[in-house]
Structure formats: structure tokens, C-alpha cells
Amino acid sequence: MQASITNTPTRYGWATILLHWLIALIFIGQFGLGFIMVRLTSQRTAFELIQLHKSFGFLLLGLVMLRIAWRLGNVWPPLPRSVGTLERRAAPLAHFALYAFQLALPLSGWALVSVSMLEIPSLPFNLFIMPNLPLAESDGAESFWAAAHWYLAYAGIALVALHAAAALRHHFQLRDGVLTRMITPSSDQE
Amino acid sequence: MYTRILGFAAVAACLAMPVSAAVALGDAAGSYSISPANSSIRFSIGKVGGGGLNGAFARFKGSIRIDNGDVGRSQVNFTIFPESVGTGQGRIDAFLRSDAVFDSANSPEIQFRSTSVTRTSDTTALVTGRLTARGKTFPEKFTAELGGLKAGTIKFHVTGKVLRSRYGMDVGTPIYSNIVDFDMTLTGKRG
């Protein structure tokens, strides 16, 4: 059985699955990294971790844009027939919100870096210079974007937790294929 | 001696600078202590994409001794107190003072002791010496240019490049260059 790159009308292909889990890992990792990096006593480690957080943020932004393009260009398997009306309505809203947070978090972080009076350039993974967004620098703007980034992070991670809880409910309580189809790719035979 | 320098100054006004300075260094022999009020120690670290981090040390002390017969036996020593670093941005200053860079609480002094002075032109000299920061000592060299000489006061413009990684201060590379460009104006008062 040959695993398919693209989705089929009933299953996800491996590109969708890879993007989902890669982004999940980076998103949750970024939350942990962000939480730790602002609580360190070592200024040196803090500086280095903040640069790493920025690097993964830009990677996340790129992957999310790719993911959205991939989603728009692929068939999308529907929820199983057994899924109830309320969840059938709520799930697309939750998924849309998840995409919105995946975009808003790196963008608000990029804005924060761009307006900071510290003027620390962004050099993702020491590979290339990422220019700043065309926003005016000021302490006020920095405080605003820092707060926005912080609130978005907590709201985003709460939504991820809800999403994970829903997936686990599908697997263990409803016993449908919603979680497993995001793990096992579609095959050409389907 | 002062009258000689004053006399020289009058002559110097009529002469080309290198020639006058050549005369001057001979007259400049003696010991000077660096006057912080008329001196500055500035530094600049380039960053990717252009621009850089510019700062200065507000507190330092030092001495300049110019040997009468042999300029090569002259000596320049200075001590910088990194606690006094200033960049115009408080958060950057706090970062520089922290153990990420200077660790000024545990290493309150950065010292330079010259080991040799070589005349490179009528008004310039290459000063080599040992720089000690955060417990590490390496040979460094600076270019000193005589900027002025008048009654009991001698002024040098000193420039040089120091690799900060040698002193355990490589944080932020490669976003910020490893090379620290020093630009100092050291004014010595005879004492």
C-alpha cells in the first residue's frame, strides 16, 4: 500500500498529516519556550532562547502559510456521519480559529520585534536577515504588541488544549476515525 | 618646559601638522594622568543588516608616560569600569552589565597595560599591550594619534578593534559582530 501525498475524499494524505503534527509540535514548543525564556535569570541564555523563539516563529509562519495554501488546494475529508449537529457546527469554527491563531501569533511576535526600541535584528537560524514589519518603533508600541502576543499565546494554547481534548474524545469515547486519520495517511488504493 | 610648549604652539600654528607633532612628541615627554572630564571611551558593534550598537564608558582612569629619549619605552595604561556603560537604552545597559556580557558585579574592571609603543609616523604610534576582562588576558593593539599638545595637556585619539569572544562576551554573535570598534579620546594632564 503506497501512502498518498494528497488527501482523498475520505482520508488525509501524508503532507496534511506532516504539516499538522509539525506545526503542532512547533506551536506547543513555542509556547513552552516563550514561557521559559522570559523567566530566566541568565540574561545570556534568555537572549539566545529569544532568538531561537524568533527563528521558530518565522518557520511557523512559513509553514502555516504553506498549510493554508495546501488546505485550499486539496479535497478535505468530511467529519464522520456519526458526528452530532452541535460539533458539526463548532468544529469548523474551532479549526478556523486555530488557523487564525497560528497566523496571529508569529505575526504579533514579528510586530513586537519590529517596534522594539532595542532594534535587535532577526536572523532566523542564523541563515538570513528577516526584515522588520514597517511599523514605527516606540516603547508604547512594544508594550502593546508584547501584551497582544502574550494574550494570543494563552488563548491559542487553550484552544489547542480544547482541540486535543476533542480529538481524544473522538478516539476513546466516540471511537470514530477522526484522530487515527490524522495519524495514518491515505493510500492510492482508496 | 611649559614656555617651550607654548612657544612650540605658536610655531605649530604656522607649520604643517605632522612636522609640528614630530617636534611636539619630544617636548611631550613626561607622565600624564588621563582626565576623564576631557576624555571619552566609545565603542561600536556592527549588526547584520547595517547599523550597530554604540555606547560609551562613563568611568575610567589611566596614565600615559612618554619617554624622553625613546618613544618605544613610553607606556599607556587604563582601567575601564564596565558598570558605567551607557548606550542610551537602559535595558541594553542592564544586559551589558549582567553576566551575559561584562558581569561587572564580579569583574568590576577592564584593564589595559601597554607592552610596547612603536612610532608609525610623526603623529601616530602603534600601542600593543595586554587587555584583561572577565579574568581573561589577551594581547591587543591600538593606534594612537596625537591630537593636540598644549601646556601640560596631551590629547590622543585612540582606535582599535577587539574580538569580544576572547573575553567570554560573544553573546549575540552573529547578529552582532564579534568585533568591537573602540574610539577613544584620551586627554592626559601632566602630573
Image (cartoon, coloured by chain):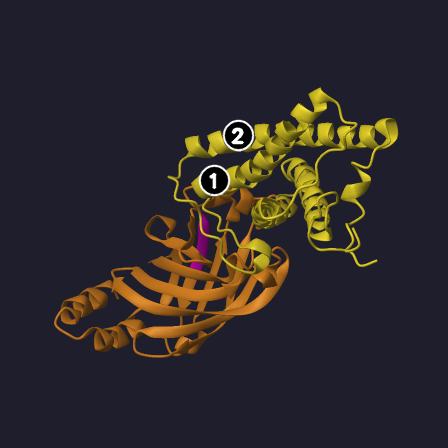
Chain colours: A yellow, B orange
Residue at 87%, 30% in the rendered image: A172
Give the x, y percent position of residue A112.
49, 38
Type of amino acid at the residue the image marks with label 1: Ala
Instruction: Say if labels 1 and 2 share a chain.
Output: yes
Residue ID for mark 1: A111
**Res A133 quadrant in image:** top left
Instruction: Indicate left or right for B7 with A20 as reference.
Output: left
| Residue B107 visible in the current orientation | no
Type of amino acid at the residue the image marks with label 2: Ala
Magenta span contains residue B2: no
Instruction: Indicate left or right for A54 with B36 as reference.
Output: right
Cβ atoms under marks 1 and 2 closer than 8 Å? yes
User: Judging from the image, what secondary structure is the residue with disc 2 in?
Assistant: helix
Residue ID for mark 2: A148
The magenta segment: B59-63
- Give whichever of A69, A132 is nearer the camera: A69
**Which label's residue is closer to the chain start, 1 or 2?**
1
